[in-house]
Image: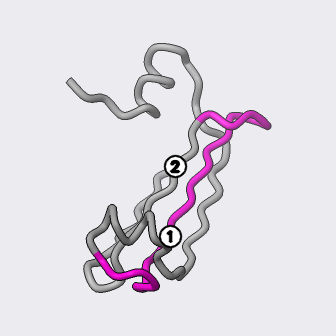
Amino acid sequence: GKEQLCRILRDDYKIIPTSTKETLELIFANEDQAEKLGVDESYPLLYLQDTRYHIDTIIEYTEVFFKGDKLRINFEYNG
């Protein structure tokens, strides 16, 4: 089955994130993004960049592109 990376790092390797940096930015689709998302070039997208650290070491990095017309984001954090 699929497991989240953060659970594998925590449960199998005892590595727990100590900080997270997230950036949410409005961008406009380039040719590659437009093709993958099935939108026109220059279509508005929200770009989320997420970096998790254990002390000073990056342990997870993700980039996500959301269509501007199909978005609802909820943030919930514990600890």
Could you tell me residue 69's position as x and y percent? 28, 85
The relative height of residue 2 versus residue 36 in the rendered view (above or below) is above
Which stretch did the figure color magenta?
39-59
* Left or right side of 71 for 25: right
Residue in view at x 60 percent, y 38 percent:
17
Q: Residues within 10 Å of mark 1 (few under 14, many from 20)?
A: some
Q: Residue at point 51% right, 55% down? A: 63
- The amino acid on which the numbered mark 1 sits, given as a three-letter code, is Tyr
Quarter of the picture holding the N terminus = top left
Q: Residue furthest top?
A: 12
Q: Residue at x 67, y 40 (%)?
A: 53
Q: Which mark is residue 62?
A: 2
Relative to residue 76, is residue 62 drawn left or right?
right
Residue 5 falls in which quadrant of the image? top left
Classified by dominant secondary structure, the portion drawn in magenta counts as: strand
Residue 32: assigned label: none
Picture coordinates of residue 78, whole percent (x, y) = 47, 52
Disc 1 target residue:
47
Choose the circle earlier in sequence order: 2 or 1. Answer: 1
Viewer-closest of 12 and 66 = 66
**Measured from the top left, where is residue 23 in percent x and y?**
61, 67
